[in-house]
Image (cartoon, helix red, strand yellow):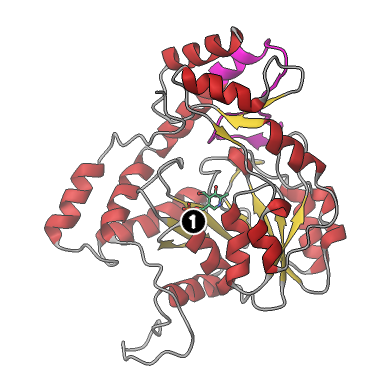
Amino acid sequence: MIPVCEPLLDGNELEYVKDAITSTWISSSGKYVSELEKKFPEYIGVNHATLTTSGTTALHLALRAIGLGEGDEVIIPAFTMIACAFSVCYCGAIPVFVDSDRETWNMNPDLIEEKITSKTKAIMVVHIYGHPCDMDPIYEIAKKHNLLIIEDAAEAMGSEYKGKKCGSLGDISCFSFFANKMITCGEGGIVVTSNKNFYDKCRYFKNLCFPLDKPRVFLHDDIGFNYRMTNVHAAIALAQLEKVDAYINLRREHAKLYNERLKDIGGITLPSEKDWALNSYWMYSILIEDKFNLSRDELMQVLKEKGIGTRPFFIGMHRQKSLLDFGCDSSGDYPVTDEIARKGLYLPSGSGLKVEQIDYICDTIRTL
Ligand SMILES: Cc1ncc(COP(=O)(O)O)c(C=O)c1O
């Protein structure tokens, strides 16, 4: 089976993990935590970073740090991964959905303003499958309505908007280090920001609200979380960060090969890359149009039988029972989200994919 996305762990991972264990610094302090919290923001081009246990907890922490609470609303894409919505719900706030842009599959900036109310506190942008959002119109809206921008860059390590790295585009930004991400440590995440106040709040809330700069007495003024990453996980993630540029190049090279081989097969829409964008192609994603010989689901089944792993696209937030039960408004139409959710799939996309495997996948699709 060609897996849909296998991690590539071909750097200093073992050496660093061994060193962390030998040193006995296996909890949430240690040189790999410090080193990663220094090097990661340098790479992204922001001032501060704090590690967390997942991309989901990074989002929760970021939203807690900006003071999101009961009665507030956050604009999020209708087409995204569920953690974006859940992190808003964890704060007692309500996620409000915006339909997608037909080409990039990201939140459509033209549809944001009509969703803003007096309760809106922030816009959460999500760079879906590695293509950056068109930020300029979003900046304008945020400025006009005095809203913060939360950036979910979990799928966009290495992607760029007008030459700036994703992760440096929001007031506060989050990444995931889950096994299928551009760099991984199994489970983990990070919040990055150039806002010192937000950074301090993140460090405070992620560590059970132990005071930041006072002796560690057991008095807590607020309710906090334990979202601390271990030094062992940080050791893996640091080794991965050392190789990130190579991984981004590999994914872009693989996308080029896929594009060349699939472009003349009728009924397949290829992923886009706008001229202002650098798409990391975190997941090589396509739409199976109605004129293709098979439906998306039939194609996935055939590919599975031929040993090729795929995944369907996300399903819209307006179709999630959990969110509707929570009180989210699902009225209105989300035609683009529904359409791409029905037609989309991703093909094997791991950095370790071989050219022969891409050939086999594309040849298989061509014969159907
Ligand atoms: C856009 C997006 N946000 C958040 C997450 C959550 O990250 P994690 O799985 O590390 O909690 C993911 C994926 O896993 C994601 O794709």
Q: Where, quadrant-wise, is the C terminus in this rendering?
A: top right
Crowd rating for badge 1 (residues with CA inside 10 Å; few <14, some 14–19, many 20+): many
Magenta stretch: residue 270 in it? Answer: yes
Magenta stretch: residue 348 in it? Answer: no
When the figure is inspected, residue 155 is found, relative to residue 65, above or below; the finding is: above
Residue of label 1: 55
When the figure is inspected, residue 68 is found, relative to residue 125, above or below; the finding is: below
Residue 80: image location, x then y, percent: 64, 48
Q: Residue furthest top?
A: 367
When the figure is inspected, residue 200 is found, relative to residue 290, above or below; the finding is: below
* Residue at point 76%, 36% (across, down): 339
* Residue at point 84%, 49% (across, down): 333
Q: Secondary structure at mark 1?
A: helix
Q: Give amino acid for label 1.
A: Gly
Q: Where, quadrant-wise, is the N terminus in this rendering?
A: top left
Q: Looking at the rendering, which quadrant does residue 226 occupy?
A: bottom left
In the image shown, does 287 or 291 lie closer to the viewer? 291
* Residue at point 58%, 64% (across, down): 87
Q: Looking at the rendering, which quadrant does residue 244 occupy?
A: top left
From which residue to which does the magenta span run?
256-285
> Is residue 148 in sight in this rendering?
no
- What type of secondary structure mainly makes up the magenta span? loop
Residue 84: image location, x then y, percent: 60, 57
Residue 334: image location, x then y, percent: 80, 47
The response on whether ligand 1 sits within 8 Å of label 1 is yes
Q: Residue furthest left?
A: 22
Q: Looking at the rendering, which quadrant does residue 356 occupy?
A: top left
In the image shown, does 125 or 49 lie closer to the viewer? 125
